[in-house]
Image (cartoon, rainbow, N blue to C red):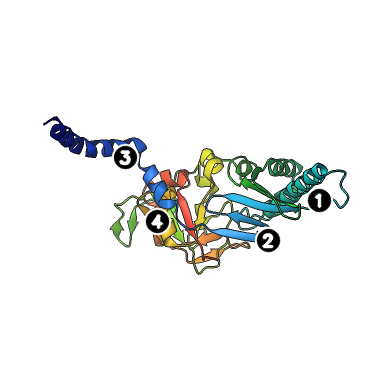
Amino acid sequence: MFAEQHRILRQWLAPIVVSLALLLSGGPMVAQAAGEGAAHYTDTVTPNARVDWTTGIATAKGIGIPPKNPASALQAKEMAKSAAWAVALRNLLEVVRGVRVDSTTTVNNFVMTNDEVRTRVEGMVKGAKLVKEQEMPDGSFETTVEMKLTGDFSGVILPKSSPRTDPLPQYKKPVVDGHTISKSYSGLVVDARGTGAQTALAPRILNEQGDEAYSVAYVEQRGVAEQGIAIYVPDLPSAQANPRVTNTPLLVKALRASGNNHTDLVVSDADVQTIHGVPEHFKFLKQAKVLVILDAK
């Protein structure tokens, strides 16, 4: 009898326990799990350096060779390790300096024209995280390091401002093609496949006249530092699985890429009307819940 009562009690409590677990997790844990197997968008800059634009992490490798006539085996090992570390950091600095900031500039432009920026960028590269250190059969070492392009790095490179919260004047009324926009969205996905668009730390979304509908100026400073302006993925399923834009993102198609670096995205006036015509949408813009789909490499 007691066993049967215990079985019934467990059956009754099970859905309650599950519901409580989901409630306490707040939902993002489920979205994160759904995104774990999604594809990442990666720029392979050199055979030894790449940037993962889905995670915002730059990675580089370096190989160090032991000296020909070391005083000891220990000295050979330590010198090979030191050389690998130095080469990895040099390769990391190279890939970081080549990162596009916006449609006209790269990190290298900032480094070459501002001594303070150069000092701080070089300091962050020197403080890169050691990912892997492997001794090879010939006594050489291969070292892998990585550095986030968000956080302190974004704080050095990107401008600081209070986020814009007002729509462009022509989009203040929430009406598209004579119909009032009633639905609000949780984020923005821009499908830029087929436009030749490129990655950048601070991409912009423009209307057909070139007016700025989204940029670093729309994002709160905390969001810029923690997660950047936007992230990139190579396909729609990866976009849908990414927790950045949560459950009901607005999907728009880029008409073309703009700017010398082809990093700005032009979308239709109707799509900008949908983005700017609903006041609640400025919340997800402020939080940089923006994702861009580029052609897979």
Alpha carbon of mark 2 to alpha carbon of mark 1: how far? 24 Å
Q: Position of residue 289 (x, y in %)?
A: 45, 48
Q: In what element is the residue under mark 3?
A: helix
Position of the C terminus by quadrant: bottom right
Tag nearer the camera, 2 or 4? 2
For label 2, the residue is 46
Tag nearer the camera, 3 or 1? 1
Q: Mark number for residue 66?
A: 1
Q: Position of residue 265 (x, y in %)?
A: 52, 60
Q: Amino acid at mark 4?
A: Gln
Q: Is residue 11 left or right of residue 120?
A: left
For label 3, the residue is 22
**Mark 4 or 3, nearer chain start:** 3
Q: Nearer the viewer, residue 57 or 15?
A: 15
Q: In what element is the residue under mark 4?
A: helix
Tag nearer the camera, 4 or 3? 3
**Mark 2 or 4, nearer chain start:** 2
For label 4, the residue is 240
- Crowding at mark 1 (Cα within 10 Å: few <14, some 14-19, many 20+): many
Q: Nearer the viewer, residue 86 or 69?
A: 69
Q: Amino acid at mark 2?
A: Thr
Alpha carbon of mark 2 to alpha carbon of mark 3: how far? 43 Å
Q: Residue at x 41, y 60 (%)?
A: 237
From this viewpoint, which residue is outermost toward the top? Answer: 2
